Image (cartoon, grey):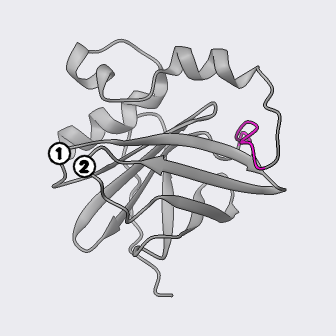
Amino acid sequence: MVGALAALTACSGGGGGDKTASSATPSATAASASSSGSSSGSGAVTGASGKLQGSWITTNGGKIVALVITGKKAGLFVTGRKAWCQGAAGQESGMQMIHLTCPDGNKDRVTGMVDSVDAKSMTVSWSGTTGKETYTKAEGGKLPSALPTKVKK
């Protein structure tokens, strides 16, 4: 399992890899190209701040949760689930937001508001049943030395 997580955290580096791993992750090239564009209309996601960018890891209910943000793109993987959730991250109505869609219909993490973020940790309040989670940033393709667990509401 640690090898799989190392592969997940390495995804944000933009390097090569096998087609299976790269096809399941948000495209760094597409995200970079789309992050320079502008969005119009109220509530539109307009680019994630640099602080949100990267690979974030937490644990919840004995499962590892990996959240990867590149440009405006966001992807989420939970161990034990077969599908990646994908969506967008960025500024919306003055707040940092994450919106995800899961192909398996899971609604645990659909809309997340970033409560706080710094170089090492990020706290997100999810609108689904998950509630609030604190993530630790994975640097250089390595897992953090300590993984946070779900914060109670």
Q: CA distance from mark 1 to mark 2?
A: 8 Å
Asked whether residue 46 is drawn in magenta, I would say: yes
- Which element is circle 1 on? loop
Type of amino acid under label 2: Asp
For the question of whether residue 32 can be seen, the reply is yes
For the question of whether residue 18 can be seen, the reply is no
Q: Say which residue label 1 marks.
A: 82
- Which element is circle 2 on? loop
Res 114 label: none
Q: Position of residue 54 (x, y in %)?
A: 54, 39
User: Residue shown at 28%/59% (left/top)?
Assistant: 64
Q: Is residue 19 left or right of residue 152?
A: left
> Compared to 52, does 95 lie above or below?
below
Res 104 label: 2
Q: Which span is picked out in magenta?
A: 43-50
Front residue of 28 and 41: 41
Magenta residues, dominant SS class: loop
Front residue of 110 and 63: 110
The answer to which image quadrant residue 84 occupies is top left
Asked whether residue 90 is drawn in magenta, I would say: no
User: Residue shown at 49%/61% (left/top)?
Assistant: 135
> Compared to 97, does 7 lie above or below?
above
User: Residue shown at 63%/30% (left/top)?
Assistant: 71
The answer to which image quadrant residue 4 occupies is top left
Q: Is residue 12 left or right of residue 77?
A: right
User: Residue shown at 66%/54% (left/top)?
Assistant: 97
Which of pointers 1 and 2 lies earlier in the amino acid sequence? 1
The answer to which image quadrant residue 63 occupies is bottom left
Give the farthest residue toward the bottom: 153
Labels 1, 2: front one: 2
Q: Position of residue 46 (x, y in %)?
A: 76, 38
Type of amino acid under label 1: Lys
